[in-house]
Image: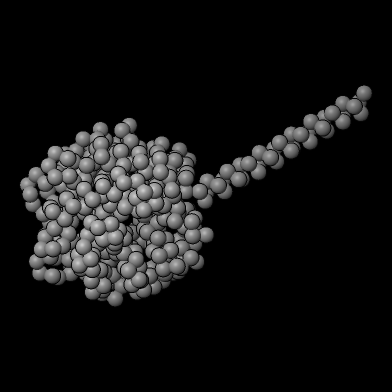
Amino acid sequence: MTNRISTRKKAILAIIVVLALAGIVLIACWIIQNKENPDVTAAFIEEHMTNDNGTIATYLKPAASENPDIVAGREALSESLGLWMQTAVVSGNRVRFDDSVQLLTTYFLNQEQEPFIQWKLRPDGQSEVTTNALGDDLRVLDALLKAFNRWGEEEYLQLAKEIGISLQAYTQTEGYFVDYHDFARNESAAALSLVYVDISALREMHNNGILSLQDYERYQDLLAHMPSDGIFYPKTYQISSGQYEYDASVNLIDQLIVGIHLAEMNHPPKDLIAFLKGEFRQHQQLAGRYTRESRKPDADYESPAVYGLAIILALQTNDLPWAQQLHERMLQFRGQNPAYPGGYVFDGNTHAFDNLFPLLAETLFEQSR
């Protein structure tokens, strides 16, 4: 009898050990999957960064808006919508893309006057602004036209044409797109931020009959003949004077986006890339801002969006080892707050682009491997 009980205990113990080991394996697989899987960031955005109406909140924490020209709290940006749409196209998620088109036409697209995309919405989907934001508009156009190329849905093309024609009619000065147009005051900006010269979107517009070849080549020339201080690029192009202007404090997000557009033209920003590699090699990090004159960090923070954009630039230049290093560093910032798995959350808050740019970058990175 004693031997029989002992044998039974051993059998039960063996079962417990096997189940425990199986549990450990499952947990390990879950950790690996969630560490490398961009879907966890998309899930974070959908669960924690999405307002009741489906628009993407700019910040995780609510905050009252004190100035309609400055984003606050759960207000939604057309920038976020465009990035979400681009990621949906890249990942082949048509349901997510169609949901985004619905948000675009329901909330962001103002049809009262000439159609334009309102750059900012209140959390309830209402807008207090009467201006567009060129860079955001072009990102949305890029997503719509690439979605049309991928899925052949005519609605995407017609919507892109509607937005593109309005842009050309109202958001141009002396033959160049400018940063914004105020549709209530009928006033336009005087300058074009070079970060907004979205070569991919402009090419798609040309290929789909929205932008003439002459206009497309004008923007190519604008970037191709853009000066550099040896590393950094100017911030704006002043239309009336034809002058490029620099910022004293350089936002690395802007520099990386300009670099991506150059790489899309087969003009990779070699000096900028060499500088970034040197910084990363020496400090194992990239700062969010740099002083243009000294080339020293002008901020003590790191931005997941910076790493996401740097990954995209590395992929554009077919530098997979560099992309891998950046990817490893970027993921160190994800999931640090256990209440928000998959999110890039710090001190209980985060900005949408610090999740959307990494999501887009990781989606592209996983497809490149």
Residue 251 picture location, percent across and down:
28, 61
Q: Quadrant of residue 111?
A: top left
Nearer to me, 291 or 91: 91
Residue 211 picture location, percent across and down:
22, 59
Seen at 82% across and 29% down, the residue is 9
* Left or right side of 136 for 238: left
Q: Is residue 232 above or below residue 144?
A: below
Q: Is residue 15 above or below residue 307?
A: above
Residue 17 picture location, percent across and down:
74, 37
Q: Quadrant of residue 199?
A: bottom left
Q: Quadrant of residue 257?
A: bottom left
* Left or right side of 284 for 198: left
Seen at 27% across and 66% down, the residue is 291
- Is residue 271 in view from this perspective? yes
- Give the residue at the far bottom of this rendering: 230
Nearer to me, 277 or 149: 149
- Is residue 336 in view from this perspective? no
Seen at 43% across and 48% down, the residue is 92
Nearer to me, 56 or 155: 155
Seen at 87% across and 31% down, the residue is 7
Residue 153 picture location, percent across and down:
34, 46
- Give the residue at the far top of this rendering: 1
Q: If the image is split into quadrants, where does the N terminus sit? A: top right
